Image (tube, grey):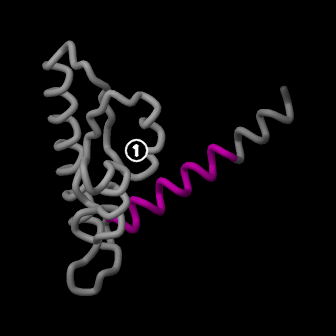
């Protein structure tokens, strides 16, 4: 890119509320850029040359699917009026946290006896 690098674009997107929600797939011949790209918010990373176009298509579809699922979850997670968790989400989340805590306690007890 003549004026901005791909990293610069990812940084700017990360700082923008609307753009930060868009999934970005980095396509490059620079294999060393993968970790930095993912740290800056890229959803996926593909290196050139692309020998299997069906892989690219599958990854694009998967990124779109994850993006759409995230939007659906976000829409049901918060009440639009109060911006608080919906009761359904709150109780479901609380149950998950309690299950995790319960499993961690039993894991600790089990580790003591082994």
Q: Closer to the camera, 1 or 59?
A: 1
Residue at image coords 34%, 46%:
42
Magenta stretch: dominant secondary structure:
helix
> Relative to the observer, which residue lies in front, 79 or 67?
67
Q: How many marks?
A: 1
Q: Secondary structure at mark 1?
A: helix
On screen, residue 71 versus residue 8, left or right, reads left
Q: Is residue 107 left or right of residue 112?
A: left
Counting from the top left corner in percent of width and height, residue 87 is at 33, 72
Is residue 96 depicted above or below 50 in this figure? below
In the displayed structure image, the side of residue 26 where residue 54 appears, left or right: left
Determine whether 49 is above or below 24 in the image.
above
Residue at the spot of label 1? 37
- Residue 102 magenta-drawn? yes
Q: Is residue 86 above or below residue 56?
A: below
Residues shaded magenta: 89-104
Quadrant (top left, top right, bottom left, bottom right) of the C terminus: top right
Q: Which residue lies at the image location 28% right of the left edge and 71% below the top edge?
A: 17
Find residue 44 and report its image quarter.
top left
* Furthest residue toward bottom: 82
Image coordinates for residue 27, horizontal then vertical, percent = 26, 34
Q: Is residue 85 magenta?
A: no
Q: Residue at x 15, y 35 (%)?
A: 61
Identify which residue is drawn at 39% across, 59% down.
Answer: 92
**10 Å neighbourhood of mark 1: few (<14), some, or many (≥20)?**
many
């Amino acid at each position: 890119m003549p004026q901005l690098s791909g990293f610069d674009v990812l940084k700017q997107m990360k700082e923008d509320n609307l753009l930060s929600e868009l999934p970005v797939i980095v396509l490059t011949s620079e294999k060393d850029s993968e970790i930095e790209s993912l740290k800056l918010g890229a959803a996926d990373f593909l290196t050139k040359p692309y020998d299997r176009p069906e892989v690219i298509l599958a990854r694009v579809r998967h990124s779109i699917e994850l993006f759409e699922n995230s939007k659906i979850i976000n829409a049901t997670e918060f009440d639009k009026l109060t911006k608080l968790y919906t009761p359904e989400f709150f109780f479901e989340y609380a149950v998950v946290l309690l299950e995790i805590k319960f499993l961690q306690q039993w894991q600790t007890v089990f580790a003591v006896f082994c």
